[in-house]
Image (tube, rainbow, N blue to C red):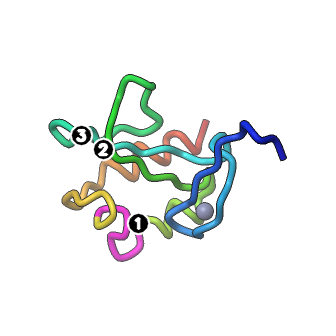
Amino acid sequence: MQENEIYRKCIACNQIKTRDTLIKITKKKSGGEIKVNPDSQFFGRSIYICKNEECVNNAFKKGKIFKILKIKDDDLLKEKIRAVLDK
Ligand SMILES: [Zn+2]
């Protein structure tokens, strides 16, 4: 375990994992635009989900991800996240 490693919590399984095993989803501070794995110039509130199908599905269960991000249901968001998975 390296000290300079960045750890974040998956919103689906609540496990703390290293940043590179997670998908980052950020809601921009101004305007509320949502981006999956944004670059470092994109500032806002971020959540993290494990890079696996199960956690992605669980994150969308009962609209959990939308509640956390405080956004309206957005079917496209799941597609965008799954696109990152399929790489
Ligand atoms: Zn997870």
Of marks 3 and 2, the one in the foreground: 3
Give the structural element (helix, strand or loop) at label 3.
loop
Q: Is residue 43 left or right of residue 58?
A: left
Residue 64 point in image, percent of width and height:
37, 70
Residue 54 point in image, percent of width and height:
59, 65
Q: Which residue is mark 1?
A: 60
Q: Which residue is mark 3?
A: 29
Q: Which residue is mark 2?
A: 27
| Mark 1: few/some/many CA within 10 Å (<14, 14-19, 20+) | some
| Extent of the magenta region | 60-66
Q: Rounded to the nearest whole Å, what is the CA distance between mark 3 and mark 2?
A: 6 Å
Give the structural element (helix, strand or loop) at label 1.
helix
Q: Is residue 56 left or right of residue 35?
A: right
Sequence-first disc among 2 and 1: 2
Q: Residue furthest front?
A: 3
Q: Residue furthest left?
A: 31
Of marks 3 and 1, the one in the foreground: 3
In this rendering, the count of numbered labels is 3
Picture disc at residue 5: none
Residue 55 point in image, percent of width and height:
56, 63
Q: Amino acid at mark 2?
A: Lys
